[in-house]
Image (tube, grey):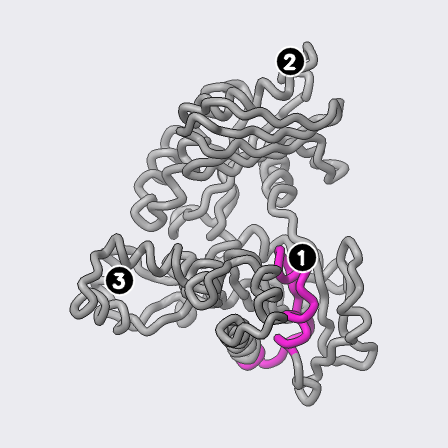
Amino acid sequence: MPRTVLVINSGSSSIKYQLIDPVAGTPLANGVVERIGESDGVINHSDTHGNVEETTNIADHDDGLRLAFDMFSRDGGSLSDWNIVAVGHRVVHGGTVFSQPTIITDDVVRTVEKLSTLAPLHNPPNLLGIEVARRMLPDVPHVAVFDTAFFHTLPQAAKTYAIDSAVAEKHGIQRYGFHGTSHEYVSRRAAEFLGKPYDSINQIVLHLGNGASASAVQAGQAVDTTMGLTPLEGLVMGTRSGDIDPGALLHLLRVGGYSVDELDQLLNRQSGLKGLSGVNDFRALSELISQGDEQAKLTYDVYIHRLRKYVGAYMLEMGGVDVITFTAGVGENAPQVRADALAGLERLGIAVDSAANAERVKGPRMISTPDSAVAVLVVPTNEELAIALAAWDMV
């Protein structure tokens, strides 16, 4: 058995995990524990011994991770047989403190806990997974990999909001950016695919999933991104609004009678594609459009409009772009989105090859025409592998 890294992504009611051989870059096992805290919890696990699914009471994160670990030894072996040398943990918010993967200590845990005010929906469950895993694997180094770390290079002009500077400093209000692990992984893979030095090209990365974000990567450094203080800003997403006039929120507070919690629910859970069309899955949205649903078509148009707006902004900001890359669930699997996002930009040196775009091929691929000055790519993201490699490098 090769040396392996266990990657854990702990959410409020689920734990996703993957065991990876970092040298070969291949997964050996993966699974998800869902509906933690409920009597009908579910664990799905796949490894070299096969696939298994169980429905059972999963009381808490202790219970969930124990069930996951039991899966690794269900055929009479033990977890130690899998030769785990490090555990990599996804942590959403590192604030201004953490700009690199970090070995987890008690001090690190306390600092991440303090940063929970900036990510109240994400950091606390991330910490639960860390706490449980450190207790269950006390002799293995644990490494925190932060979603915000890649964007610590943002220029002051890009990260600063135009509000009272004393208020901003007191409450840590600035652009932090998210999906950084994916943006860094994909931008590096794009440079490798093109055979160009990472620091020699300007890139726009479009991470389009249920959560969506764009980034501008200039000469190997992130210089802008659509998400801000929280993952709510920027592109239209599955259930999140993205950009909205802050005055609209004040209006809903004053006139609509909304509470802060109700606004949070509205913007994070009931907006975006779902808020406009009633569905947050692109396949369902496409089906509605094919049936002539005008509201679904408007939803799609709003989505594309916002996407094109940021592509144009980032091209101007960097003084030109060499490569535009689509990634994540929608970016990798929705050719119509890719085509519409870049339609009519030939005068800017961007031309998508319709046949190449329509092909469904695994792995990185080019979908621009041979004479397109800007390379357009589809590069599958792999955040788990990126976290595993970061943890491997640390130990």
Q: Give the mark nearer the N terminus: 2 vs 1.
A: 2
Which residue does the numbered mark 1 point to in the structure image? Answer: 188
Secondary structure category for the residue under label 2: loop
Q: Give the mark nearer the N terminus: 2 vs 3.
A: 2
Residue drawn at the location 48% of the way across and 29% of the way down: 41
Main SS category, magenta section: helix
Q: How far apart are marks 2 and 3 (CA)?
A: 50 Å
Q: Which mark is residue 78?
A: 2
> Horizontal placement of 158 versus 252: left or right?
right
Quarter of the rendering occupied by the C terminus: top right
Give amino acid for label 1: Arg
Q: Residue 178 carries which label?
A: none
Q: Could one spot residue 101 in this view of the protein?
A: yes
Give amino acid for label 2: Ser
**What residue span does the magenta drawing correspond to?**
314-342
| Residue 178 belongs to magenta span | no
Between label 2 and label 1, give the one nearer the viewer: 2
> As rendered, which of 21 and 8 lies closer to the eye?
8
> Horizontal placement of 260 versus 213: left or right?
left
Which quadrant would residue 283 be assigned to in this image?
bottom right
Which residue does the numbered mark 3 point to in the structure image? Answer: 168
| Residue 334 belongs to magenta span | yes
